[in-house]
Every structure is written in structure tokens, then in C-alpha cells.
Amino acid sequence: MKTNGNILFSGVGGQGILLASEITAYALLEAGMDVKKSEVHGMAQRGGSVVAHLRYGKKVYSPLIEPGAVDIMIAFESMEAVRYLPFLHSGSQVVANSHKIPPPSVATGKMEYPANLLDTLSSKVPVLSVDGFAIAKEVGEIRAANVVLVGAMSAFMPVDGDLFIQVMKKRLPAKILEVNLQAFSRGREVAQKNA
Amino acid sequence: MSQNNSTERLWLSGNEAIALGAFEAGVKMASGYPGTPSTEILENFSKYEGVYTEWAPNEKVGLEVGIGSAFAGVRALVTMKHVGLNVAADPLFTASYTGVRAGLVIINADDPEMHSSQNEQDNRNYAFAAKLPMLEPSDPAEAKEFVKTAFEISEQFDTPVLVRTTTRIAHVKGLVDTGAHTTSSVEPGLVKMPAKFVMLPGNARARRVAIAERTEKLQDFAEKFEQNRIEWGDKKIGIITSGIPYLHVKEAFPEASVLKLGMVYPFPAEMIKDFAAQVEELYIVEELDPFIELHVKALGITCKGKEIVPAIGELNSHILKKAFGKETAEQFAPESLPPRPPNMCAGCPHRGLFFNLARLKVFVSGDIGCYTLGFLPPLSAMDTCVCMGASIGIAHGMDKALGEDGRGKTVAVIGDSTFFHSGLTGLTNVVYNKGNSTVVILDNRITAMTGHQENPASGATLQNQPAHVIDIEKLCQAIGVEHITTVDPHNLDETKKALEEALAFQGPSVVITRSPCVLIPSEKKRKKIPYFVDTKNCTGCKSCLRIGCPAVNWTPVSPEEGKDLGYKEKQKGHSMINEMCNGCGECAQLCKFDAIVKAGTEEA
């Protein structure tokens, strides 16, 4: 199994990408790997397109993933999966939230949200589409959609799923732990059923 | 967080690592002004036991506070973003002359690629210009170590020390080991040293010579400094690099010989000459300006730098491979998609102001903060943005340049924190020189864009102590502004009226739009009643969409759906309010058809 890799997190500012990438990073750290993560704060965060790079392995130098070198992309919004296409190669795995958030031009009726985005994407790379919001709603916390996606992604990673659970138990506040654990295992199930 | 001398392995951002480094170096005093990507340094440092940390109103004051602490014999840390060092440049250049008693370290965070900045100046140039040593780490672990080293250098060589980070160090997380605590040997106290501290010409001339001697000593130090190191590989290619580009070099050319500069000024000339002599081809890989390149070329050494490596924007290993003609991975072509720029939050109080400025068709002299987003469509109501505080000076300049032709057509907009940072002097100038500008002070009680840092209008300090709230109305009165109005920007018509009156007033006028940022904790906790769209009443006029609120979306309907809703044939959709609604009610004020209703007030 490959022991180094590049994970790209993409989505819309405010979707919980920070927490998702932190859980993933700490699971990899628990597995004894070197991990670097890069993101941007400030103006870029106010509802705009956001991306975080996570690289792991025995020793990581650059914190930035090269175009065409992503192993797994976890996209929290459909259009934001397609936006970072140049980072992917034919062997990349995409785990994408089927949820759509209209950008300002669409929300104001000036442009249309592009149709069939994830279908177009799956003609190029394998895509696991996950209805993160529906599952999050079922476990009783809509804000846990990010962790549903992490659960689905974990099935494609070379680390034990239990490490993610350990990390959440260690790092999440007690009052949100249970729903997030459920969100994680429901997401992981979706990926395993589709495997 | 408490003191702990046993080593622990942590996973920290560069900013968290710098805070830890300062704590391990025995720093007790820290000041600065928020600015991406530097902000989290002081936020993290403030949580350590036994330290004093504050937000200064601007970077100049922050550095002066640091100089005071260093003169008093207490190690001080000062933090700011790259453009902040422009504001602090005045004390910086003369602090180079005075030197220090206890260590003084200035963290300067550059932002190549301008992720959250108005320019991408390369502040290594300040090290050369101010004749100060500058260290440049390449990852969080080095960031922590370099801060500790910087304090040693500061005291050993009697100099302030600059540490330069960039976005990809500040906001990168990596493994960091905690280390031993060090302390300063300097005794705290008031010591009169006029020849050193009083920079009048006679004293300064003597200090100028001291700087020259110091620079020579630092050059010797650079030759032996263990963070200036050569990693020998294949000698066909030798690369001199520093900071984050070092990591991109290791990624792209693991086989090359590398001279890594941990200290980017002054240079280890002998080490560079030796390295150059042993490699067949010498390259300089650095982000932004040819800073190292120019100094290497000045040594009479042939090398290649900016002729192949871009001088604009961030580097990465992909760009370097291409620059050196090395094969890169195949990649998919990008798809054409609607852009997703950042936007003001749902319920943001700035929205009501900018909607009105757009309605009034005035020229808006803008400033730096979340409200700079008022530039974007559909509001499109910002016409200049230069630097912190510039809105008022620029509006006054236009007023004086155009005279009667420009009267009542220009508005300066400035946030509360930016006003305290450097707007006060601009407003003073307007009154003093009999200007006619209208200045809007957007008082949301916090420094929002950088992540909600306290300021003199917040009522709290960085260390969460209660603080005096400056009365902006009285302040403007004291300056001499005669027309001052305060409005709630969520009330669209009242805001419009206040702006019209201010524009019509002969003489300087101030409108204060006061409403708290929706993201500050007390506002997040406040129970808010959201609005919803009664789709039957919506005529699809899109009036509510003019404010560009992310909680209000246009929803197209099919002809059948339209028919079911009783719509006329030409109505192609309706507005919809999503779960982001904060209940500000601005959209409801724009609806002429009672289609936007507050939850709980609808007719049964």
C-alpha cells in the first residue's frame, strides 16, 4: 500500500473544511506519518472558494500539492470539485458532496448553476458522490456533513478507520462527539457499499 | 498553557510555532496589529501564562511598544503583515540605530500571491534598507527555532531582528518539538543611555558607525551560522535558496546541491563563493524579488535566477520543474465555471450601507477590511482601495482637486479598526484644511476580516480584559466635525437619508453606521428570527437580490411549477431564503409585494 499521498480539500468558506482536514491530519499523525497541511485565511474565507492541501508520508518537504498529483480529492460542494480538476490525474479518487451552493452570480439569477457536474467529472476520474447533508440530517446535525465526507474518504486511505475515531474522541468537545462519530461511520459505510 | 521543559511533539501552524518560540525564549511582552497572515501569532501567545500581550491600534505603535520593552530590558515580540511594516518603518529604521537592551524581534509576514493583501511587496528589502539582520524559516519547526535564535542574535549584536514568514509558513501546519526555555541575561529596569537612546544628529552619527561595525560582525556570524548550510548532492546544479522555496527545491530537485540561507541578510559571502566555485551551474531560487540574486551577482558570481524563475506570485515545485525544463505530471484542463468570490456574510451590517452608496451613485473612496468586498457585484460600490486609512485622504484630495464639480459626489468609507489605525489623521486634515468630505465610519465593534480581533471600540483587550470604549461621535466632535449622524445600516431608508443629508452639508460630515458584526460571539449567540419567502406572493421582480445576500437565492421554476404557483407566464422563478438567514430584514424592506415574511408573523 502507498504510504505517501496528497489529499486536496475543496469547498466553500464556512463549510467546516478546517475541522475535516484537521481530523484527517491527526489520524495520519497517529499512524506515525509526517504531515503538512496548507490553507489560506483572511479575505479568501468569506464564502469564497477554499482549498486546503494535505500531504503525508515518511518525510514531507513542500506543503503544496503539484497539479496532476492529487491522490484523493474531498470536495464539500459539487462545483468546487470540478474547479480544482487540474490538480487531478486519471488515477485520482474524488469523494464529492452532491450538495450545491449557488455562487453570487447564480444566486442573483445572472448565471445558471452548471448541470450534471459530477457526471462530467466521473467521465475523467472515479467519483464517489455522497449526499452529505441528507446523511447529516439523518444523524441529527446538519453541520456534521463535513465529517460524513471524511468518513467516506477514510475508506480510500491507507490508515485504519479506527484512528479517525480515536482522534475524534480525543479532540472533539463531548457535546458534538456522538453525532460526529455517527456521521463518520455513515459516510464510511457509503464508500464501502460502493467499493 | 503552562511552562513545561520536557520535550513534546506537537503539530502546529507556523504562527502557533512562533508564539511557542517566543514563549520558550522568555518573551514577556508582545504587541502588534492584526493582519493576514500574521494574526494568530499574538492570539496564541496571549494564552501563555505570565505574558502581557496587546493589540496596538497600528503597527507603528506596536513596534514602539516593543522598542520600549527592549529599552526597559524585557524581551519583546512585535508582529505584523508585510504592509504593516510600511506603517512601522519609521520606528524601524531608527531602532536599527538605537539597538536594544533586551531582545527585540519583529515578525513580518509577507503574502506572495496576495491571498489576502493589496500588494505582494518583498520585505527582505527592508532588512537591507534598515541594515537589520533577517532570518527566514521554511516550516513551522524552523519558525519556532529561528524566533529563539533571533532573540539571541538581538542581544548579542545589539540590534532588532526581523523574522520573515510568508503565507505558506504562517498557515502551514507541521511537526514541531517543544524545547528548552531560555532567558535573557539583561536586567529589567530604567537605564539612562542617552548616547544610544536619544537619536539627535550628534548621537545618531556615532550610532551610524556602530551599525557599520555591527553589520561586519553579523557578516562573520553568517559564515558560521549553522542555519546557513550546504547540502551537497550532484554538483552539476547548485541552488541557493531560503524560506519556503527551499522546500519546493527539495521536492523538485532532490539530487541537487543546495545552499540554504537561514539568515537572508547579511550574507555569508565566503560560503556563497565556495559553493559557487564547486558547482557547474549556479541558480538562485527565491520568491518575489531577486534579493539574493542581486547580492550574489554583486560578488561577481555568475548565476541564473529571475531569468527562469518567476518574480511574480508564489512558487511551488511544479513551477520550478517547468522553469528548469524538468518533466511535470500530466494534468486535466480546467473547466469553465461561474466564479465564487468571497462575499459579505448573511446579515452583515455593511451590506445596507453599500446598497445605499450604489443607489446614490457616488464615488466611493474605500479602505481595507471586510467592507472592501463592497467592490463586488451586485453592490459594486467601491471605487478606490489603496492602503489602511487612505479612504479619507483620497476623498479629501478629490474634493480639493475638483472643487465645486466634485461636491457631494464622493464618500469615504472606513471601518472602526481602520479608523483608529490611521483614519484619525486623515479626518483631522479634512477639518483643518476646510474640506467638504463625507466620511462613513463602519462601526461593527471589531476587526472582522482578520478573524475578530478586539480594537479600541470593542470594549475588551486581546487578553479579554474589559476596556474603555472610545466614543467615536465625541471623538469626531473634538476634531471639529459639525455634522455627525449615527444610523443602523440595516435600516435602508434611514441610512439613505443620513447619507443624503451628509452629502448636502457644507463642510466635513461623518455618518457612523453602527451594528455589530454577525460573527462576534455575542451576536452568534443572540437568537435571531429568520425570514422566509412566501412564494405565492413573489412576483420574481428580483428586487431583493440587489443586495447580494448569500441567504437570498434566485430559484428558477419550470412552466408547470409556475402555473401551480399561480404565476404569470413571464415569471420564470422566485426568490428563496436559505438557512443562512440572520434575520436582518434588509431584503424584506426591498420587497413591495409582502413576499418576504419574518418567521412566526405569517398569517395562518
Image (cartoon, coloured by chain):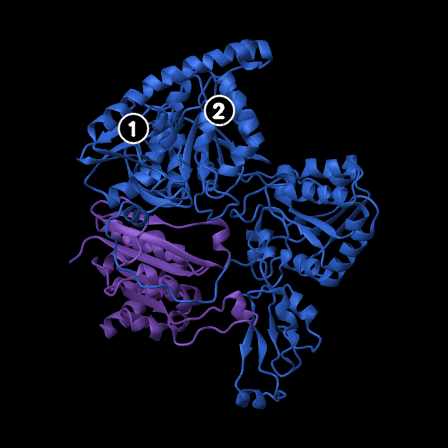
Chain colours: A purple, B blue
Q: Amino acid at mark 1?
A: Gln
> Could you classify mark 2 by the number of other residues whose Cα lies within 10 Å: few (under 14), some (14-19), or many (20 or more)?
some
Quarter that holds the C terminus of chain A: bottom left
Question: Which residue appears at 66% of the width and 74% of the height?
Answer: B601
Q: Earlier in the sequence, mark 2 or mark 1?
A: 2
Residue B407 picture location, percent across and down: 79, 49
The answer to whether B323 is drawn above or below residue B591 in the figure is above
Residue beneath label 1, please?
B227
Question: Which residue appears at 73% of the width and 59% of the height?
Answer: B360
Quarter that holds the N terminus of chain A: bottom left
Residue B578 in sight here: no
Dot label at residue B505:
none
The picture quadrant where one finds residue A75 is bottom left
Q: Nearer the viewer, residue B544 or B603?
A: B544
Q: Nearer the viewer, residue B95 or B601?
A: B95
Residue beneath label 2, please?
B130
